[in-house]
Amino acid sequence: FDLGQVVLEYSLLRDSILRLWEKDGPSSPKRAGYRVLHRAIDDSISMSVDRFTNAQARAERTLDRIATASLESQDLDDLLRRLLLVLVEMIPAIDTAAIMLRDGDVLRVSATVGLERELDGTFTWKVGDGFPGTIVAEGRPLALRTAASDPLVQNPVLRERGVRALYGVPLVDAGTVIGVAHIGSLTAYEFAEQDRRLLDALAARATSAIYQHVLHREAERRAATLTAVIESIPEAVFIADRQHITKSNRRGLELLGLGGVDELPVGHVEALS
């Protein structure tokens, strides 16, 4: 529960007890009980505030660790798993977490914590099917209270583990859903708003990393294609910017007596004059 909900519940409890007592009329023992009741409920509210404050501090530490994970990760798979580990380790209610990436109309698991069997490659979802497929199709978050028995959950691992609360968000880049991130709990029937916001923060970080990875992969693909094209030309080929030669085929390097473009000590004007 969020703090506001807890305080409201205690207020309703206090009001209900007092109204029941007042039906019987005032009495000395009852007046003493009033003091005990107020003290007990005030103490409970104070404890709730302390827990909320601690949760706020934990959320800040979680965000710090998410940022750190982004800096320390060596590749995309490592980053996604580090991000999920942060959530599971820092948020007591979270027992499982997973990120699925979209490949056309199919979703595949890229990283998971607590659901490692999903990584064996047998679990895929089409857009519109199951829990993650529905999130992609609708492009909005989705929450379930009893995931293990919900017909929308097709994953047997979630059912076997008895997952109760399940909350997922779309990973959106430039208006396009490129994947799904979800968290699950074995004890809670729903996640607090604060936990949901942390998943939103993780999703934003993951989406940015995925986008950068895709750009890097596309750049490498185009570079490989360009290299293959110019190497197929028998004459010397040079590609240059305003200052230097940036790429050349093997015939061009042989013409200059070099083993690689990085060996050029001068600008391309002097080299080719």
Image (spheres, helix red, strand yellow):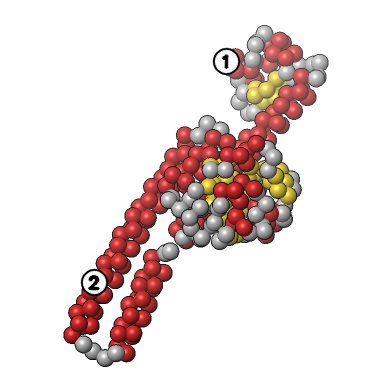
Looking at the rendered structure, the number of numbered marks drawn on it comes to 2
Give residue 221's position: percent from left, percent from top.
Answer: 70, 31
In depth, the one of 72 and 148 nearer the eye is: 148
User: Please, is residue 188 above or below residue 243 in the view?
Assistant: below
Residue at screen point 65% across, 11% down: 259
Disc 2 crowd, CA 10 A, few/some/many (<14, 14-19, 20+): few
**Where does residue 117 sit, x and y in percent of width and height?**
61, 39
Quickly name the residue at label 1. Answer: 265
Q: Secondary structure at mark 1?
A: loop
Task: Please name the residue shown 23% across and 89% down the image.
Answer: 26
Q: Amino acid at mark 1?
A: Pro
Q: Nearer the viewer, mark 2 or mark 1?
A: 2
Is the residue 193 above or below the residue 155 in the image? below
Looking at the rendered structure, the kind of residue marked 2 is Arg
Residue at the farthest top position: 257
Q: Quadrant of the C terminus?
A: top right
Horizontal and vertical percent for residue 201?
A: 50, 51
Looking at the image, is 123 positioned above or below residue 130? above
Q: Quadrant of residue 22?
A: bottom left
- The residue wearing badge 2 is 39
Image check: 71 left or right of 122? left
**Which quarter of the rendering shows the N terminus?**
bottom left
Residue neighbourhood size for the residue with mark 1, other residues' Cα within 10 Å, grouped as few (<14), some (14–19), many (≥20): few
Decide which of tag 2 and tag 1 comes sooner along the chain: 2
Observer able to see residue 270: no
